[in-house]
Image: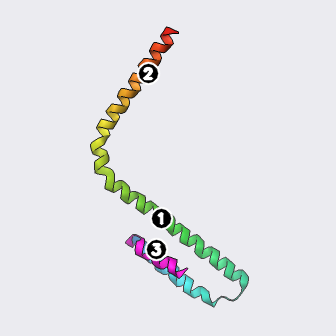
Amino acid sequence: MLDVIGIMKQLCAPIRDTWLVQLERKCRSGSQITDEKQILDFIIEILQELFSILRLMKLDMANYHIQTIKPTLLQNSIEYERGFFFFFFFFLKVIKINFQIQ
């Protein structure tokens, strides 16, 4: 578990470091638990926290990619919309002609 947290610390945004350090401390403190039920509950709790941080890291990555491609999207959006609307109105015109013929 500590290996996974170490890899996550290398890959995550700096804002997530404090959560991962807390999770790492929590993992280390769990080595003192001896009761089997408590161990299972502890592992489940750690995994839930781990996956919640992973979800946030996934959102961080998506936001980063959106910010990265934003200038390209803005440059190409006018041409894309123009082409889409041309196709859409052409398609409507063809449908209208087909309905008038029938």
Residue at 43%, 23% in the rendered image: 91
State which region is magenta: 1-14
C-alpha gap between disc 1 and disc 3: 12 Å
Dot 3 surroundings within 10 Å: few (below 14), some, or many (20 or more)? some
- Mark 3 → mark 2, Cα distance in angstroms: 51 Å
Q: Can you say whether 16 is above or below 77 in the image?
A: below
Please tell me which of labels 1 and 2 falls first in the chain. 1
Of the residues tagged 1 and 2, which is closer to the observer? 2
Q: Which comes sooner in the sequence, label 3 or label 2?
A: 3
Residue drawn where x is 52% and y is 84% of the image: 25
**Residue, disc 1:** 56
**Residue type of the residue flagged with mark 3:** Met
Amino acid carrying label 1: it is Leu
Would residue 6 be counted in the magenta stretch? yes
Rounded to the nearest angstrom, the CA distance separating label 1 from label 2 is 43 Å
Estimate how packed mark 1 is, as few (under 14), some (14 to 19) or many (20 or more) residues with alpha carbons within 10 Å: some
Measured as percent of width and height from the top left, residue 7 is found at: 46, 76
Magenta region, main secondary structure: helix
Placement of 93 over or under 86, stated as above or below: above
| Residue 22 in the figure: left or right of residue 13 | right
Q: Which mark is residue 8?
A: 3
Q: In which quarter of the image is residue 57?
A: bottom left
Q: Please tell me which of labels 1 and 3 falls first in the chain.
A: 3
Q: Nearer the viewer, residue 96 or 29?
A: 96
Q: Which quadrant would the N terminus be assigned to in this image?
A: bottom right
* Residue lying at the far top of the rendered structure: 101
Task: Say which residue appears at 41% left-offset and 75% top-offset.
Answer: 10
- Residue pointed to by mark 2: 92
Q: Residue 15 carries which label?
A: none
Q: Quadrant of residue 85?
A: top left
